């Protein structure tokens, strides 16, 4: 077996608490399908037959009752539940399932909606015998007005600085603005090996990683790393150019080093150095190929740890982790309007560019434009709903006029209400911070 | 219509025979007509019976005029000659003409004999070849190809412009399923890219941007992941060069053998060969196999089929892996050191050596020579689009050899100062021709013009039983987009596909005639180019 797929579906959706305080993020409906369905569909389309899904018990329960998940996902899902109260990072979750992992893995996040050709990422991983291969995409500006936002929101999210080499494939540098307090500093060893580096900031990390099995073993020994994106990836990118990984130490020397240094990091080198077999090295020595030119070193500068990135120029790639992204994704999936099953739509209603969930009752003379209505909602007569998000089981009283609002789970909007740009949630939710 | 044809033909025949009898030369048209009639006559012969022949003989003997005999003899059967008119015997065999025909000239007798021979040959079970020219003694390179028919055909991998052959190839790839799986797990067919220059339209031309893995499922279960990785490395050029490709292939096969499990009720020796077939097709689709790879595959298949059936699986697997290790050690590594030993004798102090491109063997020789403290300098000749010479330059300079770097257009400028030329080879063909990177034949040609000795270094495992005298028949077409170059932000050939009269050709190999090669240095010694068939014969006898 070549690759095992791991889907991380235990995230809390901390950046869209208004939507997720009742429905866990993996089960949020996008285009009337649970958010989790999209990465699972992508994996199924490219040919995976089994996926390890790491999630919480709540989500697992919801998964087993959801009709879409049961019918349309044909792969075998190996659901691993992690306890909800522990604050487990993605790397901690990988450590948790270390026993199940037998080969290299492909880690995906449940909030990724994309039509990318996965083979491009995996080909980089295979052809260059890389330790890490990831995917990034050009960020899109979100143009829709998001309920609850006063005015044009300045992206408070911090930028990521990504440095790639001339070919645009090899990942040389990755840091978040938050970690760069005094400015961006690049090591001389990187500059000596790759004198031309392109630094990009407008990229969105798709959170799709191909990792070698040795990395998972390394994680098992290094319990200090808890997040893949936040800690493991920058660590691996930095480690490409560290002295230990590059010096052609034999295994014995590496053993000595580990005894002297007591540094958990050296274990990674051990895992990686023992990988390159003598025949492969012979083939590389005979081959007249080099990944760079201009200096006197061999292919890959003799380094055994390599990180690659595939940057998507065109195509769809969304990470649904904020409210704006959620609305944007719904806009895209439902090209005009999607109406779920089991509902009742009365006459003289107008539904434009909206997504209506299952079992929704819409009475007469209702105008719904540009909105997302989740399952089980009741909309009384004469309502006018524009650019809003109505969460499940809410009731909108008759004649209500909602513009750019977010109605929380199970809320009731009184009749003849007029709300603009408000987030209407229950008082119990307001207590949680 | 047949009747009119007969009468016309009869008249014309009279003309011809008259002319012949008069001893004048036949005109071109008459000759063509003669040929056509002979052909039709042969067809008639096939269709008719013995009895017809006898009947017609009788008829013929009753024929009044002598001239009508030749008419019947050479009848133009425009339509399928089932009619009675035509059944009038063109029976040259039976036509031992009676003595009352002194007019039967030598030419007619010859024609009769020829027609007889053709008839006999046509009745043999041999299949006639297809529209293309018949190859001479060309055994197809790839082992899993067709059996040897009576008449030699072009191997299928050089008939890309024949749609029937393409269909057959697609079907063959479909049929190569992994045993034991129900669903049709086929090796996808890689589609050609871009306009192909008409002289090379019989070869495949693939684009690097459309890898074969697009059509495979991502956790590749059909094909062993090591083979998928190898195929990707071949198609992207990460593993390039004859020796590198062979070593990487053997390494991959070692992994495959290690992970192999004999299914129940199957014999390892037979089943493993079947397992390897789809992998080889896959690698062939990624990049056409080289001669050295073909020989390595032949060796492995022989070793696998020679495993005794009572051998246990683990034992067999270790034995095979040892065989592979031994093959690499003997044929590649030790051969390289033997060759460099011979070659170093030929390098004297003060030499200026010219090398072309990046040959792992030539680089090895030069590095060893410099370690043995020979004083020489090297001129590295390079050519677009591969620009492999840069890598050779790097390796030689790293070893402390002083080098000059030129492009192939400067060849005649540097040759006056060169004392010898060392060339690597991709394969050595059975008629003494050297198949190597495109540009090598030019180097050899110009070197010959300047009277500079040309030495080709090649291990014996690259000797191939094919025969080729030109670079068109069998070659490899690389991605044409490699020829595009961006200078100062502009790519001139960017829209080459839109220009209808423009075709980009990126050849990989060419053949050098043995007249331009002075010496071939192999691990068996230094031999002239014409001794290659002897080596092949000796090798075959050994095996």
Image (cartoon, coloured by chain):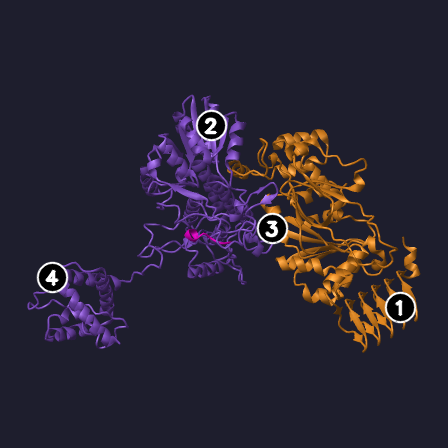
Chain colours: A orange, B purple
Q: Marks 1/4: CA distance?
A: 114 Å
Q: Which residue is mark 2?
A: B378
Q: Marks 1/3: CA distance?
A: 55 Å
In the displayed structure, B75 sits above or below B456; it is: below
In the displayed structure, B506 sits above or below A149; it is: above
Q: Marks 2/4: CA distance?
A: 73 Å
Viewer-side residue, B326 vs B208 = B208
Which chain does the numbered disc 3 sit on? A
Tag in front: 1 or 4: 4
Q: Residues within 10 Å of mark 2 (few under 14, many from 20)?
A: many
Q: Which residue is mark 1?
A: A401
Determine whether label 3 and label 4 are within 8 Å by CB: no
Q: Dividing the picture into quarters, in which one does residue A415 lie?
A: bottom right
Tag in front: 2 or 3: 2
Q: Which residue is mark 4?
A: B22
**Magenta segment:** B193-200
**Secondary-structure class at tag 4:** loop
Which chain does the numbered disc 4 sit on? B
Where is residue A1 drawn, in percent x and y?
A: 60, 52
């Amino acid at each position: 077996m070549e690759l095992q797929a791991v889907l991380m579906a235990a995230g809390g959706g901390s950046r869209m608490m208004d939507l997720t305080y009742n429905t866990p993020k993996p089960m949020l409906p996008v285009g009337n399908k649970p958010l989790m369905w999209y990465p699972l569909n992508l994996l199924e389309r490219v040919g995976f037959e089994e996926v390890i899904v790491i999630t919480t018990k709540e989500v697992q329960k919801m998964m087993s009752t959801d009709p879409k998940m049961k019918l349309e996902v044909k792969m075998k899902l190996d659901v691993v539940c992690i306890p909800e109260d522990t604050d487990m990072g993605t790397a901690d979750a990988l450590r948790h399932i270390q026993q199940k992992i037998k080969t290299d893995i492909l880690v995906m996040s449940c909030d990724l909606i994309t039509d990318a050709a996965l083979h491009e990422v995996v080909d980089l991983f295979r052809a260059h015998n890389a330790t890490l291969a990831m995917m990034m995409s050009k960020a899109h500006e979100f143009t829709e007005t998001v309920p609850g936002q006063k005015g044009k929101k300045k992206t408070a999210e911090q930028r990521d600085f990504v440095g790639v080499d001339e070919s645009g494939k090899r990942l040389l540098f990755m840091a978040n603005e938050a970690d760069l307090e005094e400015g961006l500093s690049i090591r001389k060893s990187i500059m000596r090996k790759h004198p031309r580096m392109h630094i990009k900031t407008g990229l969105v990390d798709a959170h799709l990683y191909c990792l070698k099995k040795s990395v998972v073993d390394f994680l098992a020994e290094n319990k200090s790393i808890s997040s893949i994106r936040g800690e493991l990836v920058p660590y691996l990118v930095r480690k490409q150019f560290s002295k230990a990984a590059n010096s052609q130490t034999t295994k014995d020397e590496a053993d000595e080093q580990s005894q002297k240094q007591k540094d958990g990091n050296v274990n990674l080198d051990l895992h990686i150095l023992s990988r390159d077999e003598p025949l492969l090295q012979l083939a590389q020595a005979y081959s007249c190929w080099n990944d760079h030119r201009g200096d006197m070193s061999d292919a890959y500068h003799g380094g055994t740890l390599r990180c690659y990135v595939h940057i998507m120029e065109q195509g769809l790639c969304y990470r649904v982790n904020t409210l704006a992204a959620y609305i944007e994704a719904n806009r895209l999936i439902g090209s005009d309007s999607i109406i779920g099953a089991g509902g009742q739509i009365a006459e003289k209603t107008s539904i434009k560019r909206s997504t209506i969930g299952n079992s929704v009752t819409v009475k007469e003379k209702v105008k719904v434009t540009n909105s997302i209505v989740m399952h089980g909602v009741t909309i009384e007569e004469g309502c006018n709903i524009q650019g809003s998000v109505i969460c499940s089981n809410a009731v909108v009283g008759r004649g209500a006029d909602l513009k750019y609002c977010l109605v929380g789970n199970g809320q009731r909007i009184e009749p003849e209400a007029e709300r603009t740009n408000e987030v209407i949630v229950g008082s119990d939710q307001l207590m949680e911070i | 219509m047949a009747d009119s044809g007969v009468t016309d033909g009869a008249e014309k025949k009279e003309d011809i025979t008259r002319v012949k009898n008069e001893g004048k030369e036949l005109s071109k048209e008459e000759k063509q007509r003669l040929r056509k009639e002979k052909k039709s006559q042969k067809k008639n012969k096939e269709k008719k019976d013995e009895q017809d022949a006898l009947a017609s003989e009788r008829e013929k003997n009753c024929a009044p005029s002598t001239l009508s005999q030749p008419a019947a003899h050479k009848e133009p059967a425009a339509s399928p000659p089932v009619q009675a008119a035509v059944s009038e015997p063109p029976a040259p065999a039976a036509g031992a003409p009676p003595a009352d025909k002194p007019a039967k000239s030598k030419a007619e007798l010859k024609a009769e004999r020829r027609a007889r021979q053709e008839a006999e040959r046509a009745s043999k079970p041999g299949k006639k070849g297809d529209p293309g020219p018949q190859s001479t003694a060309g055994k197809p390179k790839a082992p899993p190809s067709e059996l040897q028919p009576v008449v030699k055909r072009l191997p299928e991998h050089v008939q890309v412009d024949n749609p029937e052959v393409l269909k057959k190839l697609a079907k063959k790839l479909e049929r190569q399923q992994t045993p034991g799986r129900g669903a049709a797990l086929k090796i996808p067919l890689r589609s050609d890219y871009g306009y192909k220059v008409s002289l090379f339209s019989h070869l495949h031309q693939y684009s690097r941007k459309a890898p074969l893995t697009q059509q495979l499922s991502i956790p590749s279960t059909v094909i062993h992941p090591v083979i998928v990785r190898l195929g990707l490395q071949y198609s992207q050029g990460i593993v390039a060069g004859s020796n590198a490709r062979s070593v990487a292939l053997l390494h991959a096969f070692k992994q495959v053998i290690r992970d192999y499990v004999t299914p129940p009720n199957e014999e390892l020796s037979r089943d493993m060969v079947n397992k390897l077939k789809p992998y080889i097709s896959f690698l062939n689709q990624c990049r056409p196999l080289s001669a050295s790879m073909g020989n390595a595959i032949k060796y492995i298949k022989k070793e696998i089929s020679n495993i005794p059936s009572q051998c246990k699986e683990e034992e067999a697997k270790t034995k095979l892996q040892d065989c592979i290790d031994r093959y690499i050690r003997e044929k590649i590594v030790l051969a390289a050191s033997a060759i460099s030993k011979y070659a170093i004798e030929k390098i004297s102090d003060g030499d200026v050596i010219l090398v072309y491109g990046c040959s792992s063997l030539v680089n090895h020789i030069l590095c060893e020579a410099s370690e043995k403290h020979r004083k020489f300098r090297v001129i590295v000749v390079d050519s677009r689009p591969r620009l492999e010479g840069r890598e050779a330059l790097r390796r030689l300079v790293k070893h402390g050899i002083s080098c000059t770097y030129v492009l192939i257009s400067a060849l005649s400028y540097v040759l006056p100062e060169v004392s010898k030329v060392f060339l690597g080879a991709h394969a050595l063909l059975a008629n003494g021709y050297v198949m190597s990177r495109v540009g090598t034949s030019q180097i050899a040609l110009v070197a010959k013009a300047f009277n500079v000795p040309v030495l080709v270094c090649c291990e014996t495992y690259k000797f191939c039983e094919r025969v080729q005298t030109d670079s068109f028949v069998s070659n490899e077409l690389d991605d044409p987009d490699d020829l595009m170059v961006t200078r100062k932000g502009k790519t001139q050939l960017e829209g080459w596909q839109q220009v209808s009269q423009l075709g980009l050709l990126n050849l990989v190999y060419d053949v050098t005639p043995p007249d331009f090669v002075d010496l071939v240095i192999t691990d068996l010694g230094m031999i002239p180019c014409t001794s290659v068939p002897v080596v092949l014969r000796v090798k075959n006898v050994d095996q």
